Image (tube, rainbow, N blue to C red):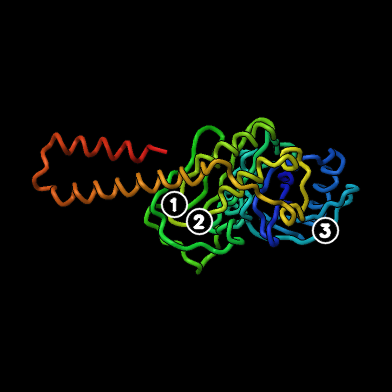
Amino acid sequence: SLGERECSLQRRRQKLVEEAPASGLSPATRKKIWEAALRLGHHLNYRSLGTVEFLLDRDGNFFFIEVNPRIQVEHPVTEMVTGIDLVKEQLRLAMGEPLRLTQKQVVQRGAAIEARVLAEDSEQGFLPSTGQIVHLKEPGGPGVRVDSLLYTGMQVTTDYDSLLAKVIVWDETRQAAIKRLRRTLQEFQVSGVATDLQFLQQIIASPDFVAGKVDTTYLEHFAPQEEEGGQVLESEVALAAAIFAHRKKEQQGSSHASTTTAGSSWRMTAWQEQMRGSH
């Protein structure tokens, strides 16, 4: 057993935020859940990576839901707290190789949280959003991981799932991880399609989430507050203006490439680099 993940924050039965380990879980209950999952795996003669899902009630009783015989979207939080590459281990098992770890060698450290960035408009009833990615700046730094295939110019359609990226953070404590995730979500920039980034930021900042007091119905009653002072709108207008100016400058530079001197080419390159690094 590689530990548990807390996945209660869901909208229409789709997970939005996941974390490991689960907050507020007593050591005794945690041990019982692990043992139950292992017993089921032995009973099924299961040989692969998989996830056993349980539902926990207010009294600490847990009930079996299902087994997912596959890697899951939220697997990075387990990787972050255990240091184990789950995809690699699953492939090794599929090739007939034995497990390289014993249960005693599985050690969890710190806390990890994952947030799903979706192409959905949270201000319009979470309607799917389509378009072309015209600007992208993914966050980074110590303890930050972003899993995505996003790139500038990418076409986002309704032919696939709305998941654009997964933002995963790690820190030594849950409270530190929450602070890191808030900063990371604020730094994530993507334009061309509507996303749930602002919605995620408000969830992470909500007192109940910070206190670890959320359940599977939490988002049914969660009411995001409107941003004050039009700061979000001003930021988006400024970003759009910068992108427009950048593209206009590139077009001018391309049309006059034959008459451009070496000095002006260097100035253009420097300006472009500044634009790429701007917020």
Comparing marks 2 and 3, which lies closer to the viewer? Answer: 2
- Cα–Cα gap, marks 3 and 1: 41 Å
Residue 100 appears in view: no
Q: Is residue 58 left or right of residue 245?
A: right
Which residue, as the protein is rendered here, is positioned at the far bottom? 159
Residue under the image location 57 percent in, 52 percent down? 196
Query: Residue drawn 84% across and 38% down?
Result: 27
| Apparent side of residue 40 relative to residue 82 in the rendered image (left or right) | right
Residue 263 position by quadrant: top left
How busy is the neighbourhood of tag 3: few (under 14 within 10 Å), some, or many (20 plus)? few
Residue 101 is situated, as x and y percent measured from the top left of the image, at: 67, 42
At label 1, counting other C-alpha atoms closer than 10 Å, the crowd grade (few under 14, some 14-19, many 20 or more) is some
For mark 2, give the secondary structure.
loop
Q: Which mark is residue 194?
A: 2
Give the residue at mark 3. Answer: 64
Q: Nearer the viewer, mark 3 or mark 1?
A: 1
Using the image as rendered, state which of residue 143 and residue 127 is in the foreground. Answer: 127
Residue 148 placed where, x, y %? 49, 51
- Residue 191 disc label: 1
| Quarter occupied by the C terminus | top left
Where residue 105 sits, quadrant-wise, is: top right
Q: Element type at marker 1? A: strand
Sequence-wise first label, 3 or 1: 3
Left or right: 159 as drawn, with respect to 77: left
Q: Is residue 276 above or below residue 152?
A: above
Tag 2: amino acid: Ala
Q: Which residue occupies the foreground of this view, 161 or 118?
A: 118
Q: Amino acid at mark 3?
A: Phe
